Image (tube, helix red, strand yellow):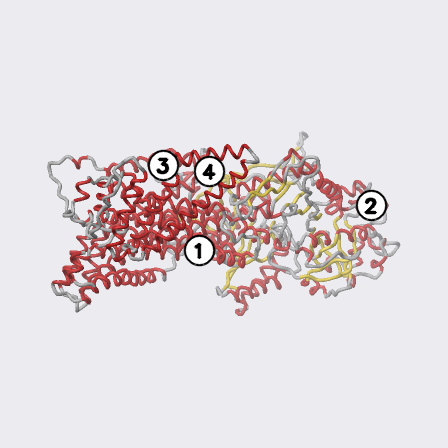
């Protein structure tokens, strides 16, 4: 058998008799190697073409000499001009001479040349080392480059979702000590804009701050640079625009009103001597047909020119609007039959819109009370379409898109001309409405996206916070709120980024482990085969260091080319991946090139693999004595096949390193569990906690593999028995040979099974992690939505609107073609209408545990409307079992619980969460089955008894706490639209659920009827899950049931599984990792089987000599390889599913969400089929090579 490094003991190559005897000479090793190599060249056929390698080596050597000469010559030229260079040149020459630079270079090139010659004899070993390093370099370089751009990948989506708005500066803020009272701060946008324009010159001088970020190539890029005397680069702060919040009001088309009010301003506020009996606030309504003729709407003031210049979609593409005009939503125009050019009166609430502008214009409170509205006539100048997501159009999250859009610049003058004539119109005309705006939207100075560059989102958040702090300092107003829409959306990708990073760490670790094992195996074989050669070198005077250099040179041969080629292929892969990402994210700012960090780390890991693999082979090579190395009669069989006997009286086995290692590992794990884990949990260090969990995950993976490996022989024997039982051509002799091979190769097969099993389990884990990642993003949405369709509002649905909506829904249900199965109501949270700052409290009767809670009422079928798996009951109370009015089977449909709330004996019973049960020890053995519910209640117009003893009605507010002894009905594990948790957490506000009649009783008299309960959510259950039918139903309900309501009234929303760029990125990344894992698993099996068969060449020769046909030999080793790969697949899949489920549980706990376990089951047969194909490939080539050779050659080799 040929070896990697050069001739073996059978090659008849003798040492050079002219070799130098001086052990201390560096030249000696070079002479020994050159002489030995030249003799071999003359005698061995494999070295006849070695002159080509000599020419290449000499050329490289001469190149380095030439390069050194050029450098020295350049310094010689420069030394004439500068004495400093002369000193440097002299020092370099002395140092090169002292270290024997030329001799060292020549020696190393000779060693490398000698190792290259050995590649011809052991191409497989070279391929194993090369491909192992090659794959790791590709994975690390590509993976880190993609992760370094993770912020840019998600930034595009975040910027689009936030409609390119970086900052929202709001003047609304409570400043009163009493939280129920406060006032609104208006912003002077004119002054604000002036300050920011001046900031072009001096903003950067504020404390000379310097904010830096990383660009896509990893280089540092200054965003705001400290300035000196004014020479710094100017920044553009003009990307800002004033806004007012949407105002709910109503209007009248002009054709609804009397002609007199169209152009006569006084007629809108006064009777003007007519028979009309009205006040300033009612005259207009009476002249327009009364309250019944108005239409509800919401209007908003925007700066059309500014918002268009900023690229915000809020103006729907319209430019600056003429004076006295507006844009109208198409649905409103359709309902009122208005066309472009038609006019409409809008009732403008003066105080809500103008606030302190009225006071500054000397408008008295009495005047405002008499005439609280400004009747403003506007001409319709265009229409726009409504959408489901207002935020995509640049409106604040949670807002409804206004029905009317008005340009600030043209509105105020038109409105002032139409105010009540009794007001001080002249002073109002002198005011600028932009000095009283409610909030300002703003973009960062260009290049604005540089603010978000960098892989660490926490640092990006810190950078944005620092910027906003300096901005507030500059504008000089501290009593404002600043929100960061883009940063808020971008930070949502933090969890995805962390998970991808942890996945990359897992894959890199497994690849490193497999690569080290593969290279270690090949090096150990080579060390055995080169034993005689090393003895000859030592006999000629070579030191141990020279032997080490020979072994190291082999790893350099495949390490350097694999790193270079790996980086080149990584760059090609990166071009393809980034091109796909740009399509997903619509971003052109993602870098197509490898980052500096990725190149450095891939090079380091590329060299780390062979360096670690060298430790044990070098130790073994140096452990032989010279006599053992020169003993040609010593068997060259690998140590793994030698028979070892142990004396039973020997004491060598008293100390077992493996047992000690296990004890040390368990001790370290105990230290981590007892100290580090609690510390990280208490400190809230999320990144370090993830790193710890990653380490524990690796430990679990390796431990599980070692555990399952104990069953590999049983699995393999079982598979052999089944195959030979099914195959009529497999006789007993084949089965016996297979059993013998499995037993004799047990140690070798364990390492193969370990590598292949880890690879397969990694593929399963990658697939499950991808699906878990998708489910995590969907779970929070499912928890919020509760059902596929939901009607909700930010406050509550007014009684009149609720009646109309429910009647409309009943009509749709009666129509079988509309696809609505049922609906159910949920109340407003109890404290929201009583005392919003004080939550309900549940406690045990002794009040040793007091837990903040949210009290809700639900309809009888509410739980039935929830999505499947998003209503789960952890346990039921014994009170449910003793309820006289209920026949309930605990194993039946748990959604009946909402119906049970309406039973006769359930008025004093509530549904709690499992967390509340554990904290208050409810329904435990010997524990209570009652608890105390405390609600803070506010009663207006309380009748107070005065000292004289007479009852007197006074307009006072009375606050009191209503306490009720209640009983639990059941304990929830999860429920959509509610805050529910199984984990005991005293700080988390969780839900308490009751019926509508019980809700009335708990209100303390504030609500006198079920019909008056404020409802905030209506769940809708479609008959079908077909997307088109659900879309049609949504449109039907929106058009027929919700239109023409006050804008505070509900809107319908629909749940859809997320299918955004982050999911596409995950899919791309996970697919890439899966392909690499399949490659490494196939490669590990092929290399292991190739090496194993090579070591069994004599056994195959013996089988041929006793008469076994080539077909049977193929069959024996294919079956052996198949059982090995198939058994590894079984072990890998079991472990992969186990680890995946462990990760699922960890993610469920951390996210407090239900995450269903799922896997692409079609992947499992693919893995089994792939293992069959790979096992055939791994056996066919080496067996074919051995069968072609004569039997005597195989036996002698």
Eye-nearest disc, 3 or 2: 3
Q: Quadrant of residue 1002?
A: top right
Q: CA distance from mark 2 to mark 1?
A: 71 Å
Q: Which mark is residue 673?
A: 3
Q: Which residue is mark 2?
A: 428
Q: CA distance from mark 3 to mark 2?
A: 70 Å
- Which image quarter is the N terminus in? bottom left
Residue 543 visible, this orientation: yes
Badge 4 marks a residue whose secondary structure is loop
Q: CA distance from mark 4 to mark 2?
A: 56 Å
Camera-nearest residue between 940 and 716: 716
Residue 981 placement (x, y as % from top left): 45, 45
Q: Is residue 856 positioned above or below 584 on the image?
A: above
Badge 2 marks a residue whose secondary structure is helix
Q: Which residue is mark 1?
A: 569
Camera-nearest residue between 638 and 1169: 638
- Which image quarter is the C terminus in? bottom left
| Crowding near the residue tagged with mark 3, few <14, some 14–19, many ≥20 C-alpha atoms within 10 Å | few
Residue 111 placement (x, y as % from top left): 32, 46
Q: Is residue 601 positioned above or below 1066 on the image?
A: above
């Amino acid at each position: 058998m040929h070896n990697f490094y050069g001739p073996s003991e059978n090659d008849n190559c003798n040492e050079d008799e002219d070799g130098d005897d001086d052990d201390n000479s560096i030249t000696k090793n070079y002479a020994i190697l050159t002489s030995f190599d030249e003799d071999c060249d003359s005698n061995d056929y494999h070295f006849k073409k070695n002159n080509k390698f000599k020419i290449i080596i000499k050329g490289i050597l001469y190149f380095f000499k030439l390069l050194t000469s050029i450098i020295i010559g350049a310094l010689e030229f420069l030394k004439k001009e500068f004495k400093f260079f002369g000193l440097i040149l002299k020092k370099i020459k002395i140092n090169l001479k002292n270290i024997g630079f030329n001799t060292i270079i020549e020696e190393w090139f000779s060693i490398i040349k000698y190792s290259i010659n050995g590649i011809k004899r052991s191409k497989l070993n070279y391929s194993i080392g090369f491909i192992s390093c090659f794959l790791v370099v590709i994975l690390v370089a590509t993976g880190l480059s993609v992760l370094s751009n993770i912020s840019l990948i998600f930034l595009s989506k975040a910027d689009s979702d936030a409609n390119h708005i970086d900052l929202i500066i709001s003047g609304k803020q409570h400043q009163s000590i009493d939280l129920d009272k406060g006032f609104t701060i208006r912003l002077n946008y004119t002054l604000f804009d002036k300050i920011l324009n001046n900031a072009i010159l001096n903003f950067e001088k504020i404390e000379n701050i310097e904010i830096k970020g990383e660009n896509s190539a990893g280089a540092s890029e200054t965003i705001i640079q400290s300035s000196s005397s004014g020479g710094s680069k100017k920044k553009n702060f003009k990307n800002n625009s004033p806004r007012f919040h949407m105002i709910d009001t109503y209007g009248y088309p002009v054709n609804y009103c009397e002609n007199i009010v169209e152009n006569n301003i006084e007629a809108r506020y006064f009777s003007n001597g007519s028979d009309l009996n009205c006040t300033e606030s009612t005259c207009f309504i009476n002249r327009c047909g009364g309250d019944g003729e108005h239409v509800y709407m919401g209007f908003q003031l925007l700066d059309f020119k500014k918002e268009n210049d900023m690229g915000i979609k809020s103006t729907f593409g319209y430019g600056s609007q003429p004076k006295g005009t507006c844009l109208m939503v198409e649905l409103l125009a359709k309902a009122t039959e208005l066309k472009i050019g038609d006019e409409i009166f809008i009732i403008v609430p003066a105080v809500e819109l103008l606030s302190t502008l009225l006071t500054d214009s000397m408008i008295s409170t009495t005047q405002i009370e008499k005439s609280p509205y400004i009747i403003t006539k506007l001409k319709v100048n265009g229409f726009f379409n409504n959408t489901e997501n207002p935020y995509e159009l640049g409106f604040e999250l949670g807002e409804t898109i206004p029905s009317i859009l008005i340009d600030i610049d043209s509105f105020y003058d038109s409105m002032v001309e139409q105010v009540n004539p009794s007001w001080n119109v002249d002073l109002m005309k002198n005011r600028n409405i932009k000095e009283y705006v409610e909030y300002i939207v703003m973009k960062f100075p260009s290049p604005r996206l540089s603010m978000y560059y960098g892989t660490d989102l926490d640092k990006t958040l810190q950078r944005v916070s620092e910027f906003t702090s300096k901005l507030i300092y500059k504008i000089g107003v501290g009593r404002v709120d600043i929100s960061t829409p883009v940063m808020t959306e971008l930070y949502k990708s933090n969890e995805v980024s962390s998970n991808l990073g942890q996945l990359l760490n897992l894959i890199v670790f497994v690849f490193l482990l497999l690569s080290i094992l593969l290279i270690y195996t090949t090096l150990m074989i080579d060390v055995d085969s080169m034993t005689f050669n090393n003895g000859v070198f030592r006999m000629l005077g070579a030191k141990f260091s020279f032997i080490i250099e020979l072994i190291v040179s082999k790893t350099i041969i495949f390490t350097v080319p694999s790193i270079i080629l790996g980086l080149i292929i990584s760059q090609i892969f990166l071009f393809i991946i980034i091109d796909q990402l740009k399509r997903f994210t619509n971003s052109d700012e993602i870098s197509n090139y490898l980052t500096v960090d990725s190149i450095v780390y891939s090079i380091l890991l590329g060299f780390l693999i062979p360096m670690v693999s060298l430790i044990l082979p070098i130790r073994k090579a140096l452990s032989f004595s010279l006599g053992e190395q020169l003993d040609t009669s010593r068997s060259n069989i690998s140590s793994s096949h030698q028979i070892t006997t142990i004396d039973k009286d020997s004491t060598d086995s008293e100390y077992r390193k493996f047992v000690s290692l296990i004890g040390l590992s368990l001790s370290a794990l105990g230290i981590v569990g007892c100290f580090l884990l609690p510390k990280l949990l208490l400190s809230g260090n999320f990144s370090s906690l993830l790193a710890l969990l990653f380490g524990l995950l690796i430990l679990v993976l390796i431990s599980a593999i070692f555990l399952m490996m104990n069953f590999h022989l049983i699995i393999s024997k079982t598979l052999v028995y089944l195959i030979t039982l099914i195959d009529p051509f497999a006789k007993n002799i084949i089965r016996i040979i297979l059993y013998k091979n499995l037993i004799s190769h047990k140690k070798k097969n364990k390492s193969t099974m370990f590598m292949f099993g880890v690879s397969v389990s990694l593929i399963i884990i990658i697939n499950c992690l991808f699906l878990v990642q998708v489910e995590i993003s969907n779970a929070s949405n499912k928890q919020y939505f509760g059902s596929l369709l939901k009607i909700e509002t930010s406050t509550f649905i007014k009684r009149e609107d609720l009646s109309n909506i429910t009647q409309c829904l009943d009509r749709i249900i009666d129509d079988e073609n509309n696809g609505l199965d049922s609906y159910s109501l949920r109340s407003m949270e109890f404290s929201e209408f009583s005392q919003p700052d004080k939550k309900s409290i549940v406690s045990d009767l002794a009040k040793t545990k007091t837990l903040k809670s949210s009290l809700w009422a639900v309809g009888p079928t509410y739980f039935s409307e929830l999505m499947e798996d998003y209503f789960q009951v952890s346990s039921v109370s014994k009170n449910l079992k003793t309820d006289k009015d209920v026949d309930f089977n605990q194993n039946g449909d748990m959604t009946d619980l909402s119906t049970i709330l309406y039973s006769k004996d359930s008025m004093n019973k509530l549904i709690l969460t499992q967390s509340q049960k554990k904290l208050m020890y409810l329904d435990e053995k010997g524990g209570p089955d009652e608890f105390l519910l405390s609600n803070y209640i506010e009663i207006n117009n309380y009748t107070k008894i005065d000292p004289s003893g007479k009852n007197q009605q006074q307009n006072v507010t009375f606050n009191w706490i209503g306490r009720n002894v209640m009983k639990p009905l059941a304990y929830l594990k999860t429920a959509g639209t509610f805050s529910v948790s199984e984990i005991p957490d005293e700080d988390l506000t969780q839900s308490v659920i009751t019926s509508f009649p019980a809700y009335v009783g708990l209100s303390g008299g504030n609500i006198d009827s079920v019909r008056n309960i404020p409802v905030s959510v209506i769940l809708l259950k479609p008959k079908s899950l077909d997307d088109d039918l659900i879309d049609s139903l949504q449109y039907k309900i929106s058009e027929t049931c919700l239109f023409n309501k006050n804008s505070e009234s509900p809107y319908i929303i629909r749940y859809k599984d997320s299918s955004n760029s982050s999911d596409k990125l995950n899919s791309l990344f996970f697919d890439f990792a899966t392909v690499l894992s399949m490659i490494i698993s196939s490669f590990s099996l092929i290399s292991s089987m190739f090496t194993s068969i090579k070591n069994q060449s004599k056994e195959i020769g013996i089988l041929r000599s006793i008469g076994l046909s080539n077909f049977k030999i193929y069959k024996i080793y294919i079956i052996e390889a198949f059982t090995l790969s198939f058994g590894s697949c079984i072990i890998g899949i079991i472990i992969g599913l186990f680890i995946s489920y462990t990760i699922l549980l960890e993610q469920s706990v951390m996210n407090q969400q239900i995450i269903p376990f799922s896997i692409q089951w079609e992947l499992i047969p693919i893995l089994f089929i792939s293992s069959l194909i790979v096992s055939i490939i791994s056996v066919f080539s080496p067996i074919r090579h051995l069968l072609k050779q004569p039997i005597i050659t195989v036996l002698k080799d």
